[in-house]
Amino acid sequence: QVQLVESGGGLVQPGGSLRLSCAASGNIGISNVMAWYRQAPGQQRELVATISRNGRTNYADSVKGRFSIFRDNAKNMVYLQMNSLKPEDTAVYYCQMNIYSDTWSDYWGQGTQVTVSS
C-alpha cells in the first residue's frame, strides 16, 4: 500500500505565499510523474502543475509565473510553492503521484485547504 499525505495549507492574505508538501510512504518502488490538482467549491477538479521524474514541469495558465512545483525523488516528496496568491486560488489542493508498487498506479492525497482572503 502507498499513502500520500499533504501539508502546508491554511489561510493567507491576497499577495501572500504558501508552500504545500506531499509525502509518499509505503511500498514504493519508483515514482514517475507527480502533480498538484485543486478543486474549488462547486467546481471540477483541475490540474495545477505537473513534474516528471527528470524535472520537466508544466503549469496551468492561471498559475504560470506564480506557482512552482518541485520534487525530491530520494524522499518521495513533491512541493508546490505558491506566490502572489489570489482569492481565486482558494480551493482544496490534492497531490497525485504515479508510483510503481506492485504495479503502476495513481495515488492521491487527502487534500489540504488553501484559503486566500483578507
Image (tube, rainbow, N blue to C red):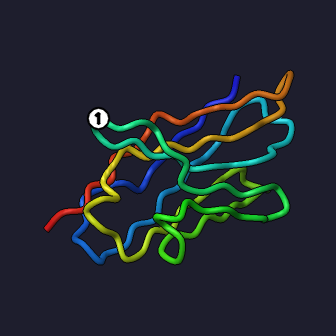
- Residue positioned 43% across, 39% down in the render: 111
Residue 100 placed where, x, y %? 84, 32
109 shown above or below 6:
above
| Position of the N terminus by quadrant | top right
Residue 9 placed where, x, y %? 36, 54
- Residue positioned 78% across, 36% down in the render: 99
- Residue positioned 48% across, 58% down in the render: 20
Question: Relative to the observer, which residue lies in front, 54 or 57?
Answer: 57
State left or right for residue 56 relative to residue 83.
right
| Position of the C terminus by quadrant | bottom left
Q: On the image, which quarter does residue 103 sit in?
A: top right
Residue 54 placed where, x, y %? 85, 62
Residue at disc 1, secondary structure:
loop
- The type of residue carrying mark 1 is Gly
- Residue positioned 49% across, 44% down in the render: 46
23 shown above or below 80:
above
Q: On the image, which quarter does residue 116 sit in?
A: bottom left
State left or right for residue 106 relative to residue 92.
right
Q: Which residue is mark 1?
A: 42
Q: Specify the farthest residue to the front.
A: 61
Question: Relative to the observer, which residue lies in front, 109 or 39?
Answer: 39
43 shown above or below 101:
below
Q: Specify the farthest residue to the left.
A: 118
5 shown above or below 12:
above
Residue 85 placed where, x, y %? 34, 70
Q: Residues within 10 Å of mark 1 (few under 14, many from 20)?
A: few
